[in-house]
Image (cartoon, rainbow, N blue to C red):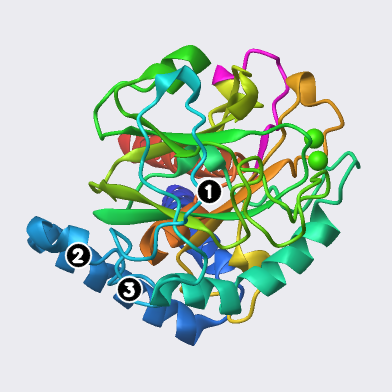
Amino acid sequence: MKKTKINTMNRTLALAALVALIATPVLRADDSNSGDNSKSSDNSSQNSDSSKSSSSDNSKSGDNNNGDNNSGDNNNNSGTVSPVQSKADPYGMDKAGSVMLAGSDAASKSFDTTVLPSLTKFVSSALPEGVNNTKSTAFEIDPNKIVLANNTAVRAYFVSEGASYHNSIGVDAVAAGQKGPQSSWDEATADTSKLIFPDASSSEGGFSSSTYGTRTATDPVLPGDFVNVGTYAKGTKLDFFLISNGANGGNNVFSTDEALNSDGFGQHVAAFTTHLFAVPQLNSPYIFLSFEDLWSGGDKDINDTIIALDVGVATVNSLLATPEPAMPLTFAACLGLALIAVRKNKKATAAV
Ligand SMILES: [Ca+2]
Ligand SMILES: [Ca+2]
């Protein structure tokens, strides 16, 4: 009777631990969708649809980022080339493409009207100029985990800058199974790296002497200007980086992979989504990256160059659902509890 009771207790314990084991990641994923279950289930079905469409027909993947995109527009080659293109070319990098004019296609018009105004307000409150922003809410997601959930045509928008330096922005696209860069030098010079904004400086930045709202040789971009970065396969990891004052000969590289940053400052990039400031928050294809351009962090305001990335809804949602560092511990704890209970149960059975 006593042994039966112990067996029943152990079985119940094992069952509870296994249920917790299975349920925990699901709860985390729901958390990220802030309590709107009906929308969250729509969302997951849309994700699986879009992943089906891109995996079943790769040849079409370049046509449409963005079975997944809010606008459904083409991210590959649409838009109007800006008449002002920077000639800067740090590290002799290949360019991802020309800078295109803000609002020159449907997707960029949508970005300008539905995202940019509320994004700008959020940036001025969460990442103010000249203030130590290392505790900002803008550190929402891990910028070192941008792995494409589908074949995706990636687009990058210039958002703002708060820098006296003329910074350059690039990306290293590491295909699934390929070894990533081992140093910031590797990253900037890899065959897989491309220059996106050779000079991310704007007359609308706080340190500019150009006439506000104009594009000039030294302030070539305005908010909403964009680059069609390229189409990358599902599973590709995108490592973005800033070359500090790269348009003026600077060569310090600060990566979203903080392990590559040799100055020891661990917060060169804040990364967030519309989740923090926009309504509706769900089904947005955008990630925002905000860089600190000074060695060792300098003033640590982490707003020196800000870009938006259109990487598709499924990739954004998988970043939002990525477990926090505490998660693996919870997972391990549940697994350990389940194993102990099963072991005890076996012992009790053997004693019968
Ligand atoms: Ca700044
Ligand atoms: Ca700064």
Return the disc, 2 or 3, that comes first in the chain's sequence: 2
Return the disc, 1 or 2, that comes first in the chain's sequence: 2
* Kind of residue indicated by mark 1: Pro
| Residue 255 is covered by the magenta coloring | no
Q: Where 323 falls versus 188 (above or below)?
A: below
* Position in image of residue 217 (x %, y %): 60, 42
**Residue at the image position 60 percent from the left and 25 percent from the top:** 246
Q: Which residues are magenta?
A: 260-270
**Residue at the image position 8 percent from the left and 62 percent from the top:** 57
* Position in image of residue 139 (x %, y %): 69, 47
Left or right placement of residue 162 versus residue 347 in this view: right
Return the disc, 1 or 3, that comes first in the chain's sequence: 3
Quadrant of res 308: bottom right
Q: Which residue is mark 1?
A: 323
**Residue at the image position 26 percent from the left and 46 percent from the top:** 232
Q: Which residue is mark 2?
A: 63
Q: In this rendering, which labeled residue sits more in front, label 1 or label 2? A: 2
Q: Where 345 falls versus 45 (above or below)?
A: above
Q: Which residue is mark 3?
A: 73
